[in-house]
Image (tube, rainbow, N blue to C red):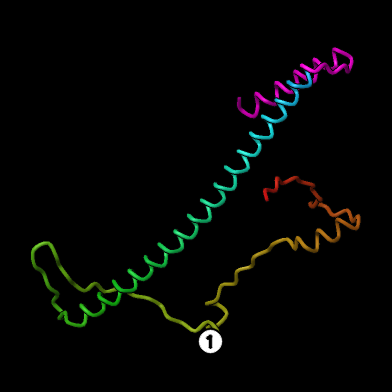
Amino acid sequence: MNLYELNKARFALLAELQDLEGELSPELEARLTALDAALDDKLEACCAVLKNMHGMAELHDAEIKRLKERRDAIEARAERLREWVGSFLGAEGWERGLHRLSWRNSEAVECELEKLPDQYRVAKVVESADKKLLLTALKTGAQIPGAQLVKRKHLQLK
């Protein structure tokens, strides 16, 4: 039985116990004990699966980090090779078979922000809420428009 079915069967058995006005026969007690044990086993299995999933997520995070570092190293080597090959290439370029090297002109602006006049600067303002300050104020009973203290429950697996 899955967790939902076990819980449904347990509630049905408890309803049956209510109908009997609380008299717990040995057969009913055995069924209730068996359902409770099955529910405990199912919950234990679910906890094992949750721990396994969290472990897999951590392994994936580590692998992603490793692969990103590897990608960055490959890109850095490719850039060094591009610069090295470019140092041997004349102004006219090079071509053979499927490969062709040539120069393309581009423009870029380099600047020192501190020395620029104000008309060439852009200010970016990022607003955010000070949640620690809000939490402290709301816990002391302050009424703040646009903010409220919300109680939540999080299942903790140890």
**Which residues are drawn in magenta?**
1-27
Q: Nearer the viewer, residue 5 or 96?
A: 5
List the single residue furthest toward the bottom: 115
The image quarter in which residue 49 lies:
top right
The image quarter in which residue 16 lies:
top right
Magenta stretch, main secondary structure class = helix
From the top left corner, tell me how far across and down residue 33 is, in percent. Answer: 74, 26
Q: Is residue 114 left or right of residue 100?
A: right
Q: How many marks overall?
A: 1
List the single residue furthest toward the right: 141
Is residue 22 part of the magenta span, yes or no? yes
Three-letter code for the amino acid on which mark 1 is drawn: Lys
List the single residue furthest toward the front: 26
Q: Which residue is at a point 64% across and 39% down the rendered structure image?
A: 44
From the top left corner, tell me how far across and down residue 59 is, in percent. Answer: 49, 56
Q: Which residue is at a point 79% across and 21% down the rendered structure image?
A: 29
Give the residue at mark 1: 115
Name above or below for residue 10 compared with residue 144. above
Q: Quadrant of the N terminus?
A: top right
